Image: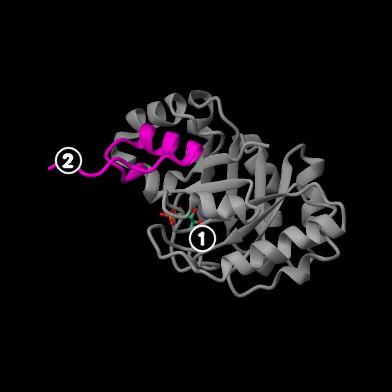
Amino acid sequence: MKHLIAPSLLAADFAKMESQIEIINKSEADWLHLDIMDGVFVPNISFGIPVIKSLRPHIDKPFDVHLMIVEPDKFIKDFKEAGADLLNVHYEACTHLHRTIDAIKKEGMQAGVTLNPHTPVFLLEEIINEVDLVLLMSVNPGFGGQKFIDNTYKKLADLKNLIERKSSRALIQVDGGVTIANAQQLINAGADVLVAGSAVFNAPNPIDAVHELKHFLPSPPPSK
Ligand code: DX5
Ligand code: ZN
C-alpha cells in the first residue's frame, strides 16, 4: 500500500480558513487530521465539534479525528454526527478501551488507538485485532511544531512485530515532528500514515509540501 499523508489542521491559519480548505482539497492529502484538545488530558485547548461540523461540507477527504480528551466515550456520537470517519482515542484516557473501541465501530466509524511516547506497544496485545489503526505519538501531545522523539523507531518495530504476529489489519500512523527529512525513514520502518502539521502548513507552498511527503521528494534548495 502506498503510504498516506494526513495534514494536521492544527498548524493551519485559522483566519484564512477558505484558503486552507482549498489547500487541503487541491493537495494530494489522503486524510485531514483534526486535533481535539481539552486542556485536561493535554495542556492545551484547540477546537471542537462545531469546527469539524462546519468544515465537513467543504472537504471531500476522510476526517481523521485525534481526541486528546478525557472521557472520550461521552462524545463518540457527537463526533460521528459532526462528520468524523476515523476516531482515535488515547490508550491513556480509556479505562475501558475495549468498550470504547466497540462503541466507535458501532457508530460506523473506523476506530484508532493512540499511544503517548512513554506508553509501550505491548499493552496493545489484547486490543490489536479490534482496532483499525494505531497512532504512535512521536512527540508529547498538546502542541504542533515539536521535535521528533527518536525512540519512535523502536516502537514502530515493536508494533509492526505485534501486528504481524497477531495477523492484525491495523494501519500504523505516526504523529508529531514529521518532516520531509524523516518521512521516508518512517515509512521504511513500518508507518502507513504520516500526520504532518507544521511541515505542511508552515511550508512556503503547502500543496508542494504534501506532494514532497507523498513522493519523498527533497525540498529544492532555498533560492539565493
Ligand atoms: C500534537 C498533535 C499533532 C500536531 C502535529 O499533539 O497531535 O497532530 O498537530 O504537529 P507537527 O506536525 O507540527 O509536529
Ligand atoms: Zn494529532
* Up-down relation of residue 139 to residue 171 (above or below): below
Above or below, 50 relative to 28: below
- Relative placement, left or right, of 119 versus 61 is right
Query: Residue 118 in the image: x percent, y percent?
Result: 60, 75
How many marks overall? 2
**Above-or-below relation of 72 to 104:** below
In the rendered structure, the answer to whether residue 151 lies left or right of residue 211 reads right
Residue for badge 2 = 223
Q: Residue 191, position in %: x, y?
A: 62, 51
In the rendering, at what x and y percent does residue 172 appear? 67, 52
Left or right: 61 in relation to 77: left
Q: Nearer the viewer, mark 2 or mark 1?
A: 2
Visible residue check, residue 48:
no
Range of residues picked out in magenta:
201-224
Q: Please give the name of the residue rendered at 78% of the width and 53% of the height, measured from the top-left corner.
A: 101
Element carrying mark 2: loop
Q: Residue at x 73, y 42 (%)?
A: 110
- The percent coordinates of residue 102 (x first, y second) are 82, 50
Alpha carbon distance from label 2 to label 1: 41 Å
Mark identifier at residue 38: 1
Q: Is residue 178 magenta?
A: no
Lower sequence index among marks 2 and 1? 1
Q: Is residue 219 magenta?
A: yes
For mark 1, does the 10 Å Cα neighbourhood hold few (<14), some (14 to 19), or many (20 or more) residues?
A: some
